[in-house]
Amino acid sequence: MTAGIASVALRPGADLDGFRAAARGLIADHVPPRDVVWSDEGEAGLFGVPHSACEPRPLMLPKGAAQLIATVVCHRDPERHALLYGLIWRLVHGEKDLLEIACDPLVHRLQRMAKSIHRDLHKMHAYVRFRRLDTAQGARYVAWFEPDHWIVAATARFFVDRFRGMDWAILTPRGSLHWDKETLSLGPPATRAEAAPSDDFEKRWLDYYESIFNPARLNPHVMRGHMAVKYWKNLPEAAAIPRLIREAPSRVQQMIDRESQMPVKRNPDKAVAAMTDQGPASLDALNRQILESDPPEPFSPRAVLGEGPVGAAVALVGEQPGDQEDLAGRPFVGPAGQLLDAALEEAGISRRDVYITNAVKNFKFKLVGKRRIHQTPTAGEIKHHRWWLQRELEFVRPRVVVALGASATQAVAGKAMPVLKNRGPTDAFGVWPGVITVHPSSLLRTPDPAAQAAAFRAFVDDLRQARELVQRA
Ligand code: URA
């Protein structure tokens, strides 16, 4: 420190504690911003913070300032500390409403920096891709990501909450995160070479991504908006995108050419299975009764029954059969079914071992030209089919019931429950330990492959939780 000039060396990166301590000392000593030289090349614990003559007190800053400081300190701009100290100085020297003056050049610049941090956080949440490494201690997942700013520590909570049950590391040139299912540690910057090579999950994800890619929804401009091209190089699905874009027009034509067939309406002269006061005596009797029901339009007359072994440990409940299920007479054989199969496999669950059924047994649709467009069943329709579902589950006797989406959750719980708020293990399913998760078709509706990949992983996580519940049940 030369006479009159305070030099402050903070740790490289986002050193919020160091910056706060330095700012407090400087304010206590009345050192104006023009007399401070900031650098972020200090060693851990070796701060060039001038020792204040008086004990520095916490700074009394107006609402919003602490958050702005905690955010902007993550920015890569080497001037960030000088700018933030300039802000603090003005806030405590008579400009306490400064943050409300959006056109003030300093406030404007800091707000833009904060925005850039938020964008970077969002991208890291969406684009981190783990690769699996099989080690002597079990599976370990390693991801490589290149953030624009010093945000690695700020994303830790998000990744721990999302992947709590996995052993993982996220490596970046701006530091790394390591989680061993119990403890989080922050590590030094890493290089791409330290990240794991491509794994089987990635290959399966790529196959799966190609199979669900909907060329009719293709809008390359929107896709690029969702996923800046600079992130593509670290995304496995990006390798397939240029070809999928090229092939999109011919795939759309194939979809149009594939005419939807209406199922033949059965003889409505139904012989409803004999019912005792207690209802059907077996799953077969129940199924006969379901097949012989004759739902009114707009439902398809063909019921699609549940499928899988009686006594299966896990029962999966969907909403209703779709167009392809209605034609095939089997649940989950269309695009949502393919996605469900991939997720089950990823979660280590064999489809052959689970019982799969739907809350509503008949496809509800609206005819638009030649296409049968899915219609969501109403609460009344779900309630109407609920009696069957309850009997069905009683016959199957699963140890855990997984509800896929809102209609299934409503059917099993007997009341509407927002899926995202209640996602995960639940005790709302009466006698059955349950898991609430999204419907796989919700993953098909987003055009953004990165968000789709993240949602797929979260869906797999939910299925893994069902498997763990079985082990505990
Ligand atoms: N969606 C469902 O909910 N069930 C099916 O069987 C297929 C798609």
Image: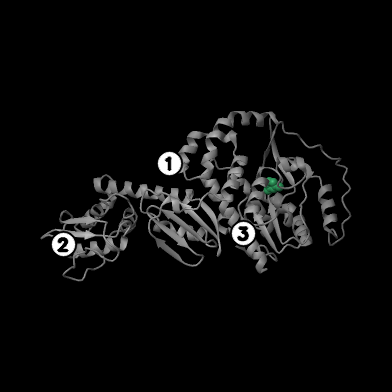
- Spatial separation of the CA atoms under disc 3 and disc 1: 32 Å
Corner quadrant of residue 458:
bottom right
- Whether residue 418 is visible here, answered yes or no, is no
- Say if mark 3 contacts mark 2, CB within 8 Å: no
Of the numbered discs 2 and 1, the one sitting upstream in the chain is: 2
Give the quarter of the figure containing the N terminus. bottom left
- Whether residue 468 is visible here, answered yes or no, is yes
- Looking at the image, is 62 positioned above or below residue 447? below
Tell me the kind of residue under disc 2. Answer: His
Question: Element type at marker 3?
Answer: helix
Residue 407 percent across, percent down from the top left: 65, 51
Q: Which mark is residue 464?
A: 3
Residue 270 percent across, percent down from the top left: 87, 45
Q: Which mark is residue 30?
A: 2
What count of labels does the image hold? 3
What is the crowding at mark 1: few (fewer than 14 residues within 10 Å), some, or many (at least 20)? few
Mark 3, mark 1: which one is toward the viewer?
Answer: 1
Q: Farthest residue toward the left?
A: 3
Tell me the kind of residue under disc 1. Answer: Lys
Residue 14 percent across, percent down from the top left: 33, 57
What is the crowding at mark 2: few (fewer than 14 residues within 10 Å), some, or many (at least 20)? few
Question: Element type at marker 2?
Answer: loop
Give the quarter of the figure containing the C terminus. bottom right
Tell me the kind of residue under disc 3. Answer: Arg
Residue depicted at 56% across the width and 48% down the height = 202
What is the crowding at mark 3: few (fewer than 14 residues within 10 Å), some, or many (at least 20)? some
Residue 63 percent across, percent down from the top left: 32, 58
Corner quadrant of residue 67:
bottom left
Q: Which residue is mark 1?
A: 230
Q: Nearer the viewer, residue 324 or 243?
A: 243
Say left or right for 289 vs 446: right
Question: Element type at marker 1?
Answer: helix
